[in-house]
Image (cartoon, helix red, strand yellow):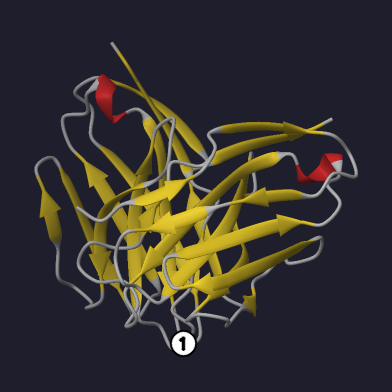
Amino acid sequence: EDKVVQSPLSLVVHEGDTVTLNCSYEVTNFRSLLWYKQEKKAPTFLFMLTSSGIEKKSGRLSSILDKKELFSILNITATQTGDSAVYLCAVTGTASKLTFGTGTRLQVTL
Amino acid sequence: DVKVTQSSRYLVKRTGEKVFLECVQDMDHENMFWYRQDPGLGLRLIYFSYDVKMKEKGDIPEGYSVSREKKERFSLILESASTNQTSMYLCAHSPPQGADRNGYTFGSGTRLTVV
């Protein structure tokens, strides 16, 4: 059975801090790892990673995958209150279905 | 932009009622998925479908069924709703090869309360 574990479960930081969110996984025939941001509604897509060691970047957010050690990290620099959300990590394997972790709840305070 | 439309944002149903949750996508995508989301448990896959009239059980199919009569529409059915099915239900779809550079697209969710 595919499995995704995210840590920490939640954290509170001050605006301007840098945070690192962790995702480890076990999946049969790994195809991709995806990061989503979820505020009050449906998850919105951030990144998809398929290759080890290649950083994906979008503004203050970046992510990297280590296929040997089976984990990924999501970095957010210079955090803002608008970054407050639940961040979800998911993987796809043989069956093209997404298996999610339970998420990391990030709260950014002034 | 790809769109996924779920018919209701909020629903309140009584125990024992038959409940239909509808999901429609505006792309010609084969893969569609139903998830439920609960605090502390994350998103869990209920059922998915790779094509019309095809369905596959996900991780928690008990108490649910699905219908896929047309490619664009994937319905989740609660045959006899129970209070432990109170949850947020999310529909998603992807192109046939799995996630593309835009990931999987989710609908805005249906928050179902069973009383």
Q: Position of residue A27 (x, y in %)?
A: 50, 79
Can residue B60 be seen?
A: no
Q: Nearer the viewer, residue A94 or A62?
A: A94
Is residue A29 shown above or below A25? Answer: below
Q: Nearer the viewer, residue B49 or B24?
A: B24
Q: Position of residue A81 (x, y in %)?
A: 27, 20
User: Tag 1, which secondary structure?
Assistant: loop
Q: Position of residue A18 (x, y in %)?
A: 23, 34
Residue at 19 percent across and 23 percent down: it is A16
In the picture, measured across the screen, residue B114 lies left or right of residue A11, that is right
Chain identifier of the residue bearing label 1 in the image: A
Q: State which quadrant residue B45 falls in.
A: bottom right
Is residue B9 shown above or below A107? Answer: below
In the picture, measured across the screen, residue B66 lies left or right of residue B8, that is right
Badge 1: residue crowd in 10 Å (few <14, some 14–19, many ≥20): few
Residue at 43 percent across and 41 percent down: it is B108
Q: Residue furthest right?
A: B16
Is residue A93 shown above or below B113? Answer: below
Quarter in which the C terminus of chain B is drawn: top right
Residue at 80 percent across and 49 percent down: it is B18
Q: State which quadrant residue A1 falls in.
A: bottom right
Per the image, the residue denoted by label 1 is: A94
Q: How many marks?
A: 1
The type of residue carrying mark 1 is: Thr
In the picture, measured across the screen, residue B111 lies left or right of residue A67, that is right
Residue at 23 percent across and 77 percent down: it is A52
